[in-house]
Image: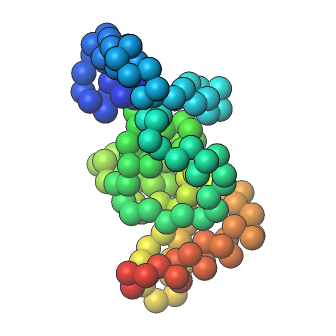
């Protein structure tokens, strides 16, 4: 609920009232989903089966909503991973590498010669590195 209020730029009280009114008018419109102990709201039309399975390596562009669409980004990334994606305090988000929905690094579409096309946070295992290399190589937009 806090993220919804933040995203809308509204105080929490009217957002809570609106969600309560929506649930009263259309009881099946929202579903509570518990993610890492936090209750999240999901619209009834969303395919929840797709949200419960690990997604493997996914490359997202800079400013993607999976990374910046929430005030509390704790479900997506820890502080070290966020410093990788937003290395300066200028608000510019680099393209991100997600592994099963968690941020593990950044990637570049067209790296300079002798430069890797990705940068991962410390501790990412070798098989993940191979999967990231394959995902970057398969990126369909050059």
Q: Residue at x 52, y 47 (%)?
A: 47
Would you place residue 1 above or below residue 133 in this image? above
Would you place residue 139 above or below residue 105 in this image? below
Please indicate whether residue 15 sits to the left or right of residue 139 in the image.
left
Which residue is nearer to you in this view: 49 or 106?
49
Quarter of the picture containing the N terminus is top left
Q: Residue at x 31, y 48 (%)?
A: 91
The image quadrant of residue 89 is top left
What is the x, y in percent for residue 104? 59, 56
Please indicate whether residue 100 sits to the left or right of residue 58 in the image.
right
Q: Residue at x 44, y 62 (%)?
A: 60
Residue 110 in view, yes or no: no
Would you place residue 100 above or below residue 125 in this image? above
Q: Residue at x 51, y 29 (%)?
A: 31
Residue 35 in view, yes or no: yes
What is the x, y in percent for residue 3? 40, 29
Please indicate whether residue 36 sits to the left or right of residue 47 in the image.
right
What is the x, y in percent for residue 8? 26, 30
């Amino acid at each position: 609920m806090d993220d919804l209020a933040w995203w809308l730029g509204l105080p929490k009280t009217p957002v809570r009232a609106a969600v309560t009114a929506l649930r009263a008018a259309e009881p099946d419109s929202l579903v509570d989903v518990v993610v890492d102990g936090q209750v999240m709201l999901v619209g009834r039309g969303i395919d929840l089966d797709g949200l419960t399975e690990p997604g493997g390596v996914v490359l997202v562009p800079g400013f993607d909503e999976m990374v910046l669409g929430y005030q509390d980004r704790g479900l997506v990334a820890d502080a070290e991973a966020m410093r990788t994606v937003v290395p300066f305090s200028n608000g510019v988000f680099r393209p991100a590498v997600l592994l099963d929905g968690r941020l593990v690094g950044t990637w570049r579409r067209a790296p300079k010669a002798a430069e890797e096309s990705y940068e991962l946070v410390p501790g990412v295992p070798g098989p993940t590195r191979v999967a990231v290399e394959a995902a970057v190589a398969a990126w369909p937009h050059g």
